Image: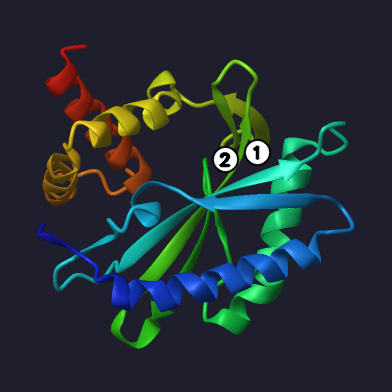
Amino acid sequence: MKFEYVPKSEFLPVKNKLVELIHRVQDEVRDDFTFRFDFIGSASRNMITRQVNGNIGYDFDVDIRVNDPEENYTAKEIKTILRKAFDKHCKSYGYDYGEDSSRVITIKVKDTKNAKIIHSCDLAIVHDCDDGRQQYIRFNKKANTYTWEHLPKRFSQLSERIAAIKENNLWQEVRDLYLEKKCNNTDKNKKSRSIFAETINEVYQDNFNE
């Protein structure tokens, strides 16, 4: 499959509308808890891609950090409250109801007439640990359980590796390799954030001999 970068002039208005939707959700859940959010990966670095002449569109990745220091809510309650809040408001912004997958809630704008996904957003609920690692809410479909799980170590090192890559003017290498990996990916379940993490780690290892 061939992929291309989506022009900023095209995805920025969509991103701004998505921010409006998330703000609506923040207001909706305020009686339970507050949260902040960040666009991550390709969405935060103007590296959004889509398949050329494809029907799956392009996607955003967003991390949601819930403020629940007293742990008043279980992992299941947090994800359920957020999913229901997105379901309540997403139709107003053209999105279909959220899909609850193992790591994220996915909302999509669909062209049902032509069986296409125009664009989508993967919303991960995460927690930053004191030791530098990160947890996310994992949905085990077979067991129908929700638990906090640690992300693999490679995800926790990304920020410092990105900084090193940029300091050494290697970002174009990242852009080229990321697009190549997208074009050669055969795993339909592999998310953009995973491919981006692989790209960063590979560029870092190739250039810093780790």
Examine the rendered structure and indicate whether residue 11 appears above or below residue 167: below
Residue 116 visible to an observer of this rendering: no
Contact, mark 2 vs mark 1 (Cβ under 8 Å): yes
Q: Is residue 21 or residue 97 the one in the foreground?
A: 21
Give percent across and percent down for residue 11: 35, 72
Is 58 left or right of 199, judged from the image as shown? right
Q: Foreground residue, 200 or 52? A: 200
Residue type at tag 1: Asn
Q: Secondary structure at mark 1?
A: loop
Answer with left or right where residue 101 lies relative to residue 9: right
Q: For this view, does 210 lie left or right of residue 146?
A: left
How packed is label 2: few (under 14 Cα within 10 Å), some, or many (20 or more)? few
Residue appearing at x 14%, y 73% in the figure: 53
Residue 182 pos. (x, y %): 19, 49
Residue sitting at x 57%, y 36%:
142
Tell me the tag on residue 15: none
Q: Identify the image quadrant of the C terminus.
A: top left
Whole-number angstrom distance, CA of label 2 to CA of label 1? 5 Å
What amino acid does circle 2 point to?
Lys
Q: Is residue 79 visible?
A: yes
The mark total stands at 2
Element under disc 2 = loop
Residue at the far bottom: name it. 113
In this figure, which residue is indicated by the disc labeled 1? 144
**Residue drawn where x is 27% and y is 56% of the image:** 47
Badge 2 is on which residue? 141
Q: Residue at x 67, y 36 (%)?
A: 146
